[in-house]
Image (spheres, rainbow, N blue to C red):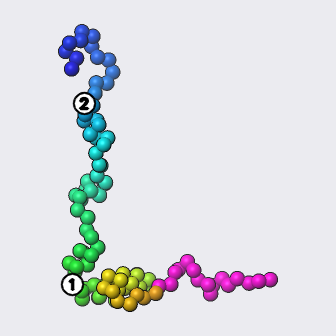
């Protein structure tokens, strides 16, 4: 690179070509998860399909109540059954009623 010049180079000498820099800047970078575990993402439905339905039902029955309602709601939406209503923990109207003075 510097063979034809008689003056030695001062400072940092780039070890990458302009084409390599352009490719690096314009390529899609992998996320940390992709770097560690590859490009394949597990789809929730593929996970549920790989598990026995009885195991899923047992897990839902043993889960705590808020989690149980959320899981049951999800499973019902996936299977097309009736959806259970869950109460929002942030909206409790009975605890702090508004009083007019």
Q: Main secondary structure of the magenta part?
A: loop
Find out whether the residues at labels 1 and 2 contact each other: C-beta distance under 8 Å: no
Residue placed at 24% from the left, 30% from the top?
A: 17
Q: Position of residue 16 (x, y in %)?
A: 25, 31
- The magenta-colored residue range is 86-101
Give the residue at the far top of this rendering: 6
Query: Can I make out residue 21 in this image?
Result: yes
Label 2: state its secondary structure.
loop
The quarter of the picture where residue 10 lies is top left
The quadrant the N terminus occupies is top left
The quadrant the C terminus occupies is bottom right
Residue placed at 20% from the left, 12% from the top?
A: 4
Q: Position of residue 56 (x, y in %)?
A: 28, 84
Residue position marked by numbered label 1 in the rendering: 52
Query: Can I make out residue 63 in this image?
Result: no
Against 42, residue 100 (above or below) is below
Q: Position of residue 28 (x, y in %)?
A: 29, 49
Q: CA distance from mark 1 to mark 2?
A: 54 Å
Judge left or right: residue 89 versus residue 77. Answer: right
The quarter of the picture where residue 60 lies is bottom left
Against 56, residue 9 (above or below) is above
Depth check: give the residue in front, 73 or 33.
73
Residue position marked by numbered label 2 in the rendering: 17
Q: Position of residue 48 (x, y in %)?
A: 26, 78
Residue placed at 57% from the left, 80% from the top?
A: 91
Q: Earlier in the sequence, mark 1 or mark 2?
A: 2
Magenta highlight on residue 91 = yes
The number of numbered discs placed on residues in the rendered structure image is 2
């Amino acid at each position: 690179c510097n063979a034809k010049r008689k003056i030695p180079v001062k400072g940092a000498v780039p070890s990458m070509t302009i084409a390599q820099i352009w490719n690096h800047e314009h390529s899609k970078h992998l996320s940390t998860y992709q770097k560690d575990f590859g490009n394949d993402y597990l789809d929730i439905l593929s996970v549920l399909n790989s598990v026995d339905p009885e195991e899923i039902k047992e897990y839902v029955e043993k889960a705590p109540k808020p989690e149980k309602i959320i899981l049951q709601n999800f499973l019902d939406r996936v299977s097309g059954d009736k959806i259970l209503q869950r109460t929002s923990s942030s909206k409790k109207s009975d605890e702090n009623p508004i009083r007019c003075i």
